[in-house]
Image (cartoon, helix red, strand yellow):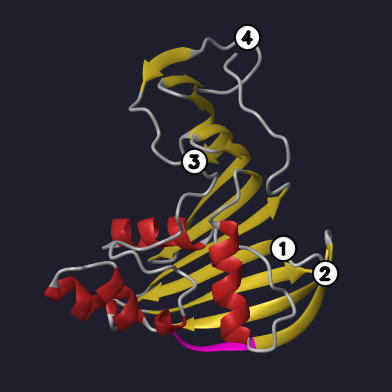
Amino acid sequence: MIRRALAFVAALVIASGTSAFADDPKDSFHSAVKVTASAKTARVAITQHVTAKGRTTDSTANGVLAAGDQDLQLSGEGGGSHRIAVGTKVKERRPDGAGQPWRESARNAPAQSTALGPLTLADGTSIGDPKLYTVVTDAGSESLPQGQARKLIGQLDMTAVATAMQASPNDRARMATWTGTLTLWVGSDGKVVRNAVHLVIPSNSGPTAIDAEVDLSDLDAPLTVTLP
């Protein structure tokens, strides 16, 4: 179930977009995700923290996404790595550092033509769809390094999320006990500059908390990824 939760987080944390000043927060939220799904390029900076049984595991990812290609520097408990994928070719070095050799491999040709993918769950529901949230609130504005941004907080309806993920009946029942939020910060130009997901998963041994935050910039900028 933790793997399923992390897959859900991976989809949520990259949700962003426009319509910063639409009147209804749910409409703004939905429109933001839909617009971002069409972005061809983006710079991303992601931090993730998973806390369970009093122990926290941290990981980061920073780099460029261009359609199905990517250039990402990653860090985690296993150390740092650098992965570059262009078309069917992949080069990776671990540990990352000047003078370290690149390992070559292959992958299937990416089908997506956008940087972040469709931003949908298994049944095709957009992750900004109002039916996935019990409420979306406008929390005012905050000052970020990128400037002033409108803050929208969506309270996740985990039963609706589990249904959209096409989870098994047993998993749907478990996910219904989870709680979570997806928060978007939308800049004055109508683009989301930061978003974050927070999930709490209860268990007999204590809750697991998953927190992930992503900064997005240069959406649809002329960015390219090249192999070393």
Quadrant placement of the N terminus: bottom left
Q: Which of the numbered marks, if any, corresponds to residue 113?
A: 3
Label 2, secondary structure: give it.
loop
Q: Which amino acid does label 1 sit on?
A: Lys
Mark 2 to mark 3: distance in Å?
A: 27 Å
Mark 2: few, some, or many residues within 10 Å (few <14, many ≥20)?
A: some
Q: Write down the residue under mark 2.
A: 188
Q: Write down the residue under mark 4.
A: 99
- Which callout, 2 or 3, points at the residue further toward the start of the chain? 3
Foreground of the two, 195 or 198:
195
Left or right of 119? Residue 185 is right
Q: Give the range drawn in magenta.
A: 133-137
The mark closer to the camera, 2 or 3, is 3
Q: Write down the residue under mark 1.
A: 191
- Which callout, 1 or 3, points at the residue further toward the start of the chain? 3
Left or right of 29? Residue 21 is right
- Which callout, 4 or 2, points at the residue further toward the start of the chain? 4
Query: Can you give x and y, in whole percent of width and height, for residue 169 in the image?
Result: 13, 75
Quadrant placement of the C terminus: top right
